[in-house]
Amino acid sequence: MERLFFAVFIGMVSTAGWSQNLVLKPVVDERTELMSIVFRLAGSKEYMNQDIKRYSDSIDLWFKPYQNDPVVSFARKLRIFHFVAYDAVMSMAVHLEIDKGTVGLKRGTRQGSIDKRWGHTGDKFVLLLNDFYRKSDFHTFFLSKKALFVVAETRFSKIANTVDLAWYEKFFGSKPAGTFNLLISLCNGGENYGQRIMFDDGNEDVYSIMGSRATDSLGFPVYDAKIQKTIVHEFCHSFCNPSGTKYFPELKTVAGKFYKLVKENMEKQAYGDAQTMIDEILVRACVIAYYRDHGVKPARINQLIRAEQASGFLWIQELTDALGRYEASRDRYPAFDSFMPEIISLQKGLAPDKVLRETERNRPRIINFSVKNNSREVDPTTNALILTFDRPMSKISYGMTYGIGGKLCYP
């Protein structure tokens, strides 16, 4: 999910004549920043990014008088009582339009296009949002950050241009009857979102909304090439989620059993129910298929699968293998949605407890550590901790955690 710009123009990509050299134009979009800042004022942790300090400090200074504005208070209630947070906020953002200083809902969108968590509150929220936009002089604030946005867009373009958009039509058997849009958000920190707008005329626009975290020595955002994987991931949501929703009643029983086993892990990633987990595992398996189709070596593909298993997506190996069969049988399965009954059959044939045990059995284990467990007299001059695993470990990627006690217990 990403977007940022100085007008309501969004980096559009024509769907005519799809080819390998389609180019994404990353933009900072005023609507995204407006929604992010309102929910930041409402105390939503996912929009409390402090990493781009030259931006966050100016937000906190400019909008300090509006911390208890009616739209901010309403946003707090929506979060508490309707769980409007994370991607639901961005769903509303892409459904907005700003015309001649007035914020309103985009015309011609299909009923049900906006995230269901908004329920019947959308109209009231937009009225309050429009009032906030006017009296806070939001547009002037947005324009004042143009230099920062241009740097973000320029730097992100180098990565965005490496995404093969033609793959989506080839793999999923369909393409959006609209545009691909890549938006950068400086308020979202490490959170990224995939969104879609459905129109009454059958057109669809898909969005990848990317957060920003790292900066250079001058405080301008920088982006690592690894973020390409996240762009691919977020666009996949617009193709996978409709199938996940459509077939979830048939996936629900076994999905619930899997979710119960990994609930704590899922909740840490803000995946609060089994249906969200289904959407995510479909997307993550498709991302692995993307890299497999682009010549990534099997050893690296295996690492991607193991990483997803560690994140709680226990049957992603089986699902990824199934997608290989899907790609080899496109005469029988012309589109991803037509293969979903096979995925349902696959999932129903799995025993969640058994899959979990097998996953645990395959995890690397530490068999030796240079500091004895529970030691209280460790030499303070020690400058290296040596861990020995029961197998060779990847040199390509690594991870770290603060441990069971979380960040507050980290020395």
Image (cartoon, rainbow, N blue to C red):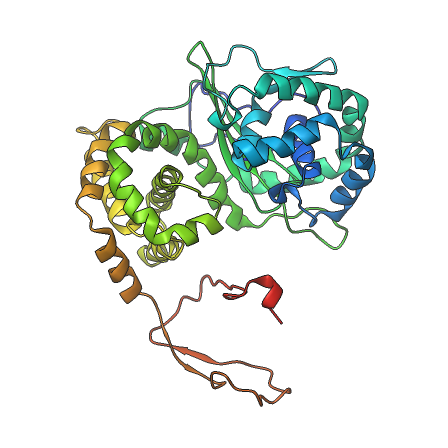
Can you say whether 18 is above or below 369 in the image? above
Query: Looking at the image, which is closer to me, 291 or 282?
Result: 282
Residue 170 appearing in the image:
no
Task: Return the x and y of residue 386 as percentages of the image width and height.
Answer: 48, 81
The one of 31 and 66 positioned closer to us in this rendering: 66
Whether residue 61 sits left or right of residue 109 in the image: it is right
Question: Where residue 19 sits: x, y (%)?
Answer: 42, 27
The structure residue drawn at horizontal position 67% and vertical position 17%, both measured from the top left corner, is: 127
- Percent position of residue 331, x then y: 18, 28
* Residue 125: quarter of image: top right
The one nearer the camera, 24 or 232, is 232
Give left or right: position of 359 versus 118: left
Considering the image in quadrants, where does the N terminus appear? top right
Q: Is residue 394 above or below residue 33?
A: below
Q: Is residue 47 visible?
A: yes
Name the residue located 41 percent from the left edge and 13 percent from the top edge.
202
Count of numbered circles on the image: 0
Q: Is residue 29 left or right of residue 227?
A: right
Residue 187 is drawn in which quadrant? Answer: top right
Picture layout, residue 153 above or below residue 366: above
Give the percent coordinates (x, y) of residue 335.
27, 27
Q: Quadrant of the C terminus?
A: bottom right
